Image (tube, grey):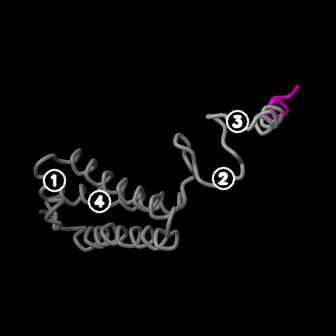
Amino acid sequence: MSPGRLKQDHAKHEQASGRASITSRSSATSSPGLLDLPEMRFPELYVWLIFVSSLDIMLTWVILRDGGEEVNPVAKLVIDAWGLNGAILFKFGLILFVIICCEVISRVRPRVAFLLIWFGVLISSFPPVWSVALLIMHAGEVF
């Protein structure tokens, strides 16, 4: 007998006896169980957020290495206190916070979560674009 057939027979037995298994979930319910991990709502946008944020860290470090200064006061405090490792942890902690917020919000208000992640990607793309512009403008200078 196939495993699929066994599950069907077990489900019929549970329905006939009036009991439900703790580990199985009815296919009629759409909400996830306690230990179930639902699919992420906006995985492609999360990849873009991680990509532009990674570019921001890398380009910031190149500018700092070449004698530039960090203009974001919060990032400056983190970099001064913990260096590159602290900046990476701080940046990806913020990314994780945004992704978790989008996932939680999307369960209730998917449109708001979609706009939030798009806004996050858009805002996060400005520092890398500006960093590239600065690197191009100051390409021949020695600090």
Q: Is residue 59 above or below residue 26?
A: below
Q: Determine the residue positioned at 41% across, 68% down.
A: 121
Q: Which residue is mark 1?
A: 78
CB of mark 2 within 8 Å of CB of mark 4? no
In the rendered image, the quadrant that contains the N terminus is top right
Across and down, in percent, residue 102 comes to 44, 62
- Badge 4 crowding class, 10 Å Cα cut-off, few under 14, some 14 to 19, many 20 or more, is many
Of marks 1 and 3, the one in the foreground: 3
Q: Which residue is mark 3?
A: 19
Of marks 2 and 1, the one in the foreground: 2
| Mark 4–mark 3 distance (CA, rounded to whole Å) | 59 Å
Q: Residue furthest right?
A: 1
Across and down, in percent, residue 13 comes to 80, 33
CB of mark 4 within 8 Å of CB of mark 3? no
Q: Which residue is mark 4?
A: 59
The residue segment tinted magenta is 1-7
In the rendered image, the quadrant that contains the C terminus is bottom left
Q: Residue furthest top?
A: 1
- Badge 2 crowding class, 10 Å Cα cut-off, few under 14, some 14 to 19, many 20 or more, is few
Q: Determine the residue positioned at 78% across, 37% down.
A: 11
Mark number, residue 29: 2
Q: What SS does tag 4 mark? A: helix
Does 36 sit left or right of 65 as displayed?
A: right
Q: Is residue 82 above or below residue 123?
A: above
**N-term mark: 2 or 1:** 2
Q: Quadrant of residue 97?
A: bottom left
Q: What SS does tag 1 mark? A: helix
Does 33 sit left or right of 85 as displayed?
A: right
Residue type at mark 3?
Answer: Arg
Of marks 2 and 3, the one in the foreground: 3
**N-term mark: 2 or 3:** 3
| Mark 2–mark 3 distance (CA, rounded to whole Å) | 16 Å
